[in-house]
Image: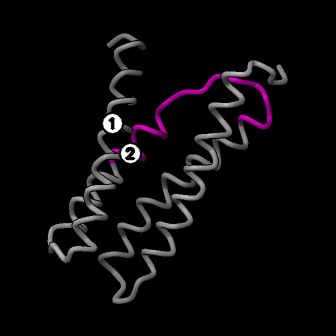
Amino acid sequence: MSTNKLQQLWNALVVIGGIGIIIAIVTIISGWTWGPHVYTVSAGCFALGQINTPIHSTDPTIKRLRRQQIFGALALVLAALFMFTTNGNEWIACLTIAAVLELYTAFRLSHLLESGKTKK
């Protein structure tokens, strides 16, 4: 499989996983019993796609943001684990942390990569 096709696959997994996460959160709030299962599969797809999406840069800021982004993706999966193993709402705290990290890194990384003013 060529690198372009593989890149398209990872991007598709991120998009499908992201949409699935939003749908799953709505179904969990509404009380649907399969909501956590949909969330788990969606978070897994999102994390898998995001972790395998390469960003080639030697800039330390981009590397730091990339590590934060991967940590956020893993926190999404950890929130799925908390849904099944705890009786409380610990998963909401983990999901909030993951969402803040993902949102911050998405905006910062896109800004740095598009500006081209990174340290080489």
At 42% across and 75% down in the image, what residue appears? 91
> In the rendered image, which quarter is residue 92 located in?
bottom left
Of the image marks 1 and 2, the number of the one nearer the N terminus: 1
Toward which corner of the image does residue 89 lie, by quadrant? Answer: bottom left
The part of the chain drawn in magenta is 45-62
Quadrant where the C terminus lies?
top right
Label 1 crowd (10 A; few <14 / some 14-19 / many >=20): many
Q: Is residue 13 magenta?
A: no
Quarter of the rendering containing residue 36: bottom left
Image side of residue 47 versus residue 115, left or right = left
Q: Determine the secondary structure under disc 2.
A: helix
- Of the pair 3 and 28, the residue shown nearer to us: 28
The residue identified by callout 2 is 46
- Residue at the image position 58 percent from the left and 58 percent from the top: 100
- Provide residue 77's location: percent of width, then percent of height: 41, 60
Q: Is residue 40 above or below residue 15?
A: below
Q: Residue at x 26, y 60 (%)?
A: 24
Residue 46 highlighted magenta (yes or no): yes
Query: Pointers 1 and 2 in contact (CB under 8 A)?
Result: yes
Q: Is residue 43 above or below residue 79?
A: above
Name above or below for residue 60 compared with residue 68: above
Q: Point out the image quarter for the N terminus.
A: top left
Question: Looking at the picture, does residue 21 appear above or below residue 13?
Answer: below
- Please name the amino acid that badge 1 sits on: Leu
Q: Position of residue 6 (x, y in %)?
A: 37, 20
Nearer-the-camera pick, 46 or 105: 105
- Considering every residue shown, the one lying at the far left of the view is 33
Q: How many marks?
A: 2
Location of mark 1 (residue):
13
